[in-house]
């Protein structure tokens, strides 16, 4: 069973700043790593699939990188609507799993 | 409109059963895997179960194996989660989610419902 560890747990930043979120897998997931955004009271929204592919309608300020066990989600310049919780998920093998989440909050 | 809508949640006593439903529309339902993901109050996301487009392959998290069963009826564009022997720790919002790609193991989720709340308490 693959475990995903996200860091930091909370990221305090100001609008316009760059956000760098990390997701580490307990063993290689190749490029099968996914990122979601979740706002309070809402369902998750797909941002990035297979490490670096932006989902339909996702702004270019969101980018994903990494392979194997270490992955990064970067938000190049935070907009007010980007303050939310971000989760990674692997689809490398069963069982699927999510990371614990990173909350991006307004500083 | 492309959407999935969950129903069937509610309050149930420990040891009880509940069946969740997820009605899909706006896409070729039988071409896509479907999954259930839950979120306990104030907690993160937890994958629960998945079923292939044909329904022939099912997968469950260890925490629910033997208690929960996922199934689908492609004639009704609906996926189900039968939950038996419910425990307090099963209390969560249960989301239905559509796999991101057709005819394959594209187990990321590009369409989510609003969720249905299951509360297990005496």
Image (cartoon, coloured by chain):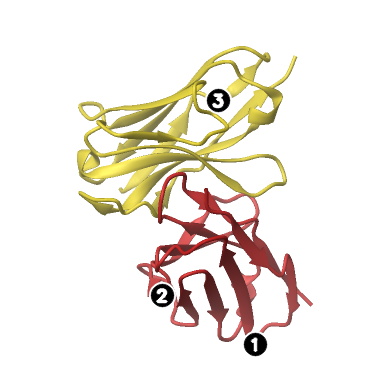
Query: How far, Cα to Cα, is label 3 from label 1?
Result: 41 Å
For disc 2, the marked residue is: A52
Q: CA distance from mark 3 to mark 2?
A: 35 Å
Question: Residue B22 is drawn in which quadrant?
Answer: top left
- What subunit carries mark 2? A
Give the residue number, with chain letter if any, for mark 3. B9
- Chain for numbered disc 3: B
In the image, which lettered chain appears red?
Answer: A
Question: Tag 3, which secondary structure?
Answer: loop
Residue A54 position (above or below residue B15)? below
Residue A49 drawn above or below residue B98: below
Residue under the point 20% across and 49% down: B103
Q: Residue at x 69, y 30 (%)?
A: B89
Question: Judging from the image, what is the letter of the chain drawn in yellow?
Answer: B
Helix, strand or loop at label 1? It is loop
Q: How many angstroms separate mark 2 from mark 1 (CA)?
A: 22 Å
Q: Is residue A11 left or right of residue B11?
A: right
Residue at screen point 43% across, 71% down: A51
Classify residue B55 by image quadrant.
top left
């Amino acid at each position: 069973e693959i475990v995903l560890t996200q860091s930091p747990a909370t990221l305090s930043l100001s609008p316009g700043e760059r956000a760098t979120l990390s997701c580490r897998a307990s063993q290689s997931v190749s490029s099968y790593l996914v990122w979601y955004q979740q706002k309070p009271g809402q369902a998750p929204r797909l941002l990035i699939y297979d490490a670096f592919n932006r989902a339909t309608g996702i702004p270019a300020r969101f980018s994903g990188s990494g392979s194997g066990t270490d992955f990064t989600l970067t938000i190049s310049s935070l907009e007010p609507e980007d303050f939310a919780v971000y989760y990674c998920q692997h689809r490398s093998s069963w069982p699927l799993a999510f990371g614990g989440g990173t909350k991006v909050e307004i500083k | 409109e492309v959407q999935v809508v969950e129903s069937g949640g509610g309050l149930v006593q420990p040891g009880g059963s509940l069946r969740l439903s997820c009605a899909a529309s706006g896409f070729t339902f039988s071409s896509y895997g479907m999954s259930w993901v839950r979120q306990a109050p104030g907690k993160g996301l937890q994958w629960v179960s998945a079923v292939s487009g044909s329904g022939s392959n099912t997968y469950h998290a260890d925490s629910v194996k033997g208690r929960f069963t996922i199934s689908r009826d492609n004639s009704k564009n609906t996926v189900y989660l039968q939950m038996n022997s419910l425990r307090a720790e099963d209390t969560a919002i249960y989301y239905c989610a559509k796999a991101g790609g057709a005819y394959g193991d594209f187990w990321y989720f590009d369409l989510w419902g609003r969720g249905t709340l299951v509360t297990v308490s005496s």
